[in-house]
C-alpha cells in the first residue's frame, strides 16, 4: 500500500516541487502551506511521515512539531534554513526524526524519507510483543505468557489486558476502558470492567502471586511492573 506523506511548506514552489517528486516515487502526498493548516491536517489524518518546514506563517514548525508529538509518533523530517541551527537542535530534542538543510538535493531528501519510514516499520515490529514484568503479550497470536507459561484468556480479557499494557504506568478510568474495550455502544453496567479485572487478577496476579494490576480508588486501574 502506498505510504502517505504530508508536506508542510509555505513556499509554494518548493511545496509543489516536493509533491511532484514524492508523487513520482509512489507516495501519496498532501500539502499544507502554513503551520495552522499543517497542524490541522497532521492531527486529523493518518500520515506515514511529515516533512515540516520550520519558518511557517501562523504557527511555526517547532510549535507544530511539539503539538504533533503530544499525539503521535509519526516520523517528522524538518526542513531548515542555514541560519536556523538553534531551531534544528530544538526540533531534534523535541522528537523530530531527522532534518535537511535548504537548499537540498531531492535525492538526499528521498533517502532520508526512506530511512525514516524503515525505522518506523521496525518500531512497529518490536511493539507487537509487549511486556510488563514477566508477563508477555503477543499481538499476532493473541497469546499471553508468564515466564513462558501460557495463560488462557478469553478475547475480551485479552483486549482489556492489552489496553492496560499498551498504557503501562498510566491510570485508565473505567469509562475509558469501557469505551475502548467494549465500545461506545455497550449498554449495561459499568461494573463489567471491575468484573473482568477480577478475572484477570485471578488468572495472573493471584495465580503467580504477583501484583501487576492496581486499583486506583474512585478512578480506575493501572498496570505496572512490580516494585
Ligand atoms: Ca518557510
Image (cartoon, helix red, strand yellow):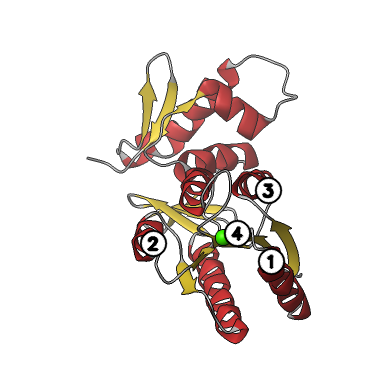
Residue at screen point 75% across, 24% down = 185
Task: Tell which of 76 and 156 is nearer to you.
Answer: 76
Number of residues whose C-alpha sits closer than 10 Å to that of mark 3, classed few (under 14), some (14–19) or many (20 or more) = some
Identify the residue position indicated by label 2 in the image.
92
- Secondary structure of the residue carrying tag 1 is helix
- Secondary structure of the residue carrying tag 2 is helix
Tell me if residue 179 comes above or below residue 103 in the rendering.
above
Report the number of numbered marks: 4
Tell me if residue 102 comes above or below residue 66 in the rendering.
below
Work out which quarter of the rendered image holds the N terminus and state it.
bottom right
* CA distance separating discs 4 and 1: 43 Å
Asked if the residue under mark 2 is in contact with the one under mark 3, i.e. CB atoms within 8 Å, the reply is: no
Identify the residue position indicated by label 3 in the image.
41
Number of residues whose C-alpha sits closer than 10 Å to that of mark 4, classed few (under 14), some (14–19) or many (20 or more) = few
* CA distance separating discs 3 and 4: 34 Å
Identify the residue position indicated by label 1 in the image.
15
Residue at screen point 48% across, 43% down = 70
Give the mark nearest the N terminus, 4 or 2. 2
Residue positioned most to the left? 227
Callout 2: CB less than 8 Å from ligand 1: no
* CA distance separating discs 3 and 1: 15 Å
Asked if the residue under mark 1 is in contact with the one under mark 2, i.e. CB atoms within 8 Å, the reply is: no
Numbered circle sitting on residue 141: 4
Q: Where is residue 211 in the image (x, y as percent from the top left)?
A: 31, 35
Task: Tell which of 170 and 104 is nearer to you.
Answer: 104
Nearer to us of marks 4 and 2 is 2
Give the mark nearest the N terminus, 2 or 1. 1
- Secondary structure of the residue carrying tag 3 is helix
Task: Tell which of 67 and 54 is nearer to you.
Answer: 54
In the rendered view, does 9 fall on the left or right side of 225? right
Amino acid at each position: 500500500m502506498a505510504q502517505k506523506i504530508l508536506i508542510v511548506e509555505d513556499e509554494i514552489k518548493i511545496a509543489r516541487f516536493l509533491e511532484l517528486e514524492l508523487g513520482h516515487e509512489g507516495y501519496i502526498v498532501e500539502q499544507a502551506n502554513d503551520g495552522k493548516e499543517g497542524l490541522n491536517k497532521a492531527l486529523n489524518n493518518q500520515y506515514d511521515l511529515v516533512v515540516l518546514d520550520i519558518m511557517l506563517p501562523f504557527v511555526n514548525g517547532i510549535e507544530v512539531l511539539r503539538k504533533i508529538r503530544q499525539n503521535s509518533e509519526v516520523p517528522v523530517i524538518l526542513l531548515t534554513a542555514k541560519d536556523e541551527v538553534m531551531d534544528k537542535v530544538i526540533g531534534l530534542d523535541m522528537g523530530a526524526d531527522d532534518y535537511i538543510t535548504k537548499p537540498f538535493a531531492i535525492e538526499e531528501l528521498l533517502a532520508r524519507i526512506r530511512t525514516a519510514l524503515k525505522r518506523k516499520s521496525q518500531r512497529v515490529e518490536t511493539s507487537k510483543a509487549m511486556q510488563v514484568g514477566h508477563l508477555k503479550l503477543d499481538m499476532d497470536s493473541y497469546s499471553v505468557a508468564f515466564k513462558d507459561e501460557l495463560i488462557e484468556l478469553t478475547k475480551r480479557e485479552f483486549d482489556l489486558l492489552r489496553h492496560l499494557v499498551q498504557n503501562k504506568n498510566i491510570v485508565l478510568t473505567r469509562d475509558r476502558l469501557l469505551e475502548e474495550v467494549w465500545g461506545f455502544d455497550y449498554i449495561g453496567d459499568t461494573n463489567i470492567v471491575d468484573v473482568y479485572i477480577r478475572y484477570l487478577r485471578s488468572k495472573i496476579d493471584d495465580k503467580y502471586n504477583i501484583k501487576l494490576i492496581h486499583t486506583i480508588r474512585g478512578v480506575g486501574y493501572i498496570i505496572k511492573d512490580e516494585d
